[in-house]
Image: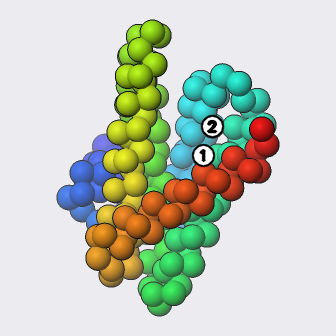
Amino acid sequence: MKPILAVFWNICLLRRGPELVPTHPMFVGGVLVADMLVSFFVGLQFGDTLTPMQVATRVIVSMATTAAAAWMMLSMRDVIARYPATITALFGCDLLFTLLSAILVPLASSDATALKAGIIDLIVIWSIAVNGFILHRAMNVTVFIGILLALGTAFLGGALSFAASGP
């Protein structure tokens, strides 16, 4: 377990690329399910006004958008064989970022809403940079293009998940 977490942590630190991630179908599925479950439970913890169905819808739509966008981008660059490693790296790093926010946000006092927002904002910026790095390595594009693609994917996933879950 520790070596697998080390692979994802090294990707989050921009030391390694997605090509080192195991691509066995059971592992890919396990990472997807783990990210979905952790995102759901953390979303329930922080989404005070959201119903469980809204949280589940947001998580599923956001993950589906990320997976579909990655597939389309890799297809356009004719490197679709890198898809399993790419989505495993994307969702494995998202799992670590979600766990990190679940640990750090409750540490801030209940009165420090600005601190909580700052922590979440820093984690979001870091995750977009990491996703851009993953796309850069997977698609053979510059880091800047990878970050722009990751930012676009994040905005699209956020917009679609908010639209799908309702007000």
Helix or strand or loop: what does disc 1 sit on? helix
Q: Is residue 109 above or below residue 118?
A: above
Decide which of 125, 131 is in the foreground and name it: 125
Question: Is 143 situated left or right of 97 in this image?
Answer: left
Locate residue 77: give its quadrant. Answer: bottom left
Query: Front-most of 129 and 159?
Result: 159
Residue indicated by mark 2: 40
Position of the N terminus, as image quadrant, is top left
Q: Horizontally, is 6 left or right of 97 in the view? A: left
Could you tell whether 166 is left or right of 71 in the image?
right
Tell me the residue that label 1 is attached to.
36
Depicted 33 relative to depicted 80: above or below: above
Number of on-image labels: 2
Occupied quadrant, residue 82: bottom left
Q: Position of residue 62 (x, y in %)?
A: 62, 53
Measured as percent of width and height from the top left, residue 121 is found at 41, 38
Disc 2 is placed on an element classified as helix
Q: Is residue 148 left or right of residue 55?
A: left
Image: 60 above or below 144:
above
Question: Considering the image in quadrants, where does the C terminus appear?
Answer: top right
Mark 1 residue type: Met
Residue at position x 76%, y 29% in the image = 51
Residue placed at 37% from the left, 64% from the top? Answer: 147
**Residue 36 spot, x, y in % from top left:** 60, 45
Name which residue lies at 46% across and 38% down.
98
Circle 1/circle 2 CB separation < 8 Å? yes
Q: Report if residue 66 is visible in the image.
A: yes
**Separation (CA) of disc 1 from disc 2:** 6 Å
In this view, which residue lies farthest toward the left?
A: 15
